[in-house]
Amino acid sequence: MYEEKVIEIEKLFLDPKNYRIDFERYNTTEKAVERLYLDEDIMGMTKGLVNFPGLHPHEKMIVVPKDKGEYKVLEGNRRLLAIKSLLGMIEPPAKHKREIIGLASKLSAETKESLRHIGTVVYEVGDKGYLKILADKHSSISYQRWGQISQWHFFKDLYDLKHRNIDLTANDLGKSKSDVSNYIRYYNLFSYIR
């Protein structure tokens, strides 16, 4: 089960296992931030937050409890990084710093305050109900899709989580067994080559 909850931005943290990031190479927050800015259009997301202004009401982040009232963001890492950059809570890469400061200066006090309280959907750590949502959003519908390798990695992790049962994995994702099988095979081949 899950509950909808408004959480202060200070209690939300990037997911170190975010499928957009290869944490074998980008294994610190600073490196992850640099990687996300480089390849995931964080500037476009940031400009959208300024132009709207703020988050669209339906854009809730999917989170799980971390510890001591803190939460790990499973869905919404790009938004989280853009918000924390605008609010001066995460330092953007040097080449974007001036532009971020300029964009932040355009935010009204009301918008800044709204960005400090984020609508979330909180799942318990053991509840994996969010997995189908992540799979649908990033592999089949028109959201900012994960790259192919990120999709393969996600499918492989879920397969491992389901005790290597292809039927359970395909059922949880609403995908065909052949698609899931192929993605797992591709990821294994990629890992072997790498």
Image: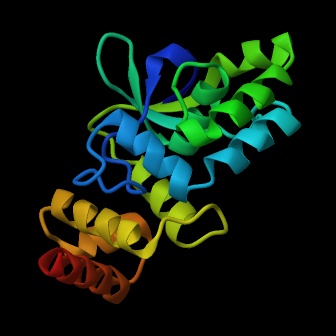
Residue drawn 68% across the image and 46% down it? 43
Residue 101 in the image: x percent, y percent?
Answer: 72, 26
Residue drawn 12% across the image and 79% down it? 192
Q: Quadrant of residue 102?
A: top right
Q: Quadrant of residue 190?
A: bottom left
Q: Is residue 29 left or right of residue 158?
A: right
The answer to whether 148 is drawn above or below residue 25 in the figure is below
Q: Is residue 114 left or right of residue 194?
A: right
Q: How many marks?
A: 0
Residue drawn 31% across the image and 10% down it? 68
Residue drawn 36% across the image and 72% down it? 149
Dividing the image into 4 quarters, which one contains the N terminus?
Answer: top left
The answer to whether 69 is drawn above or below residue 101 in the figure is above
Q: Quadrant of residue 74?
A: top left
Q: Nearer the viewer, residue 121 or 48?
A: 48
Residue 167 in the image: x percent, y percent?
Answer: 25, 76
Residue 50 in the image: x percent, y percent?
Answer: 82, 33
Q: Is residue 85 left or right of residue 28?
A: right
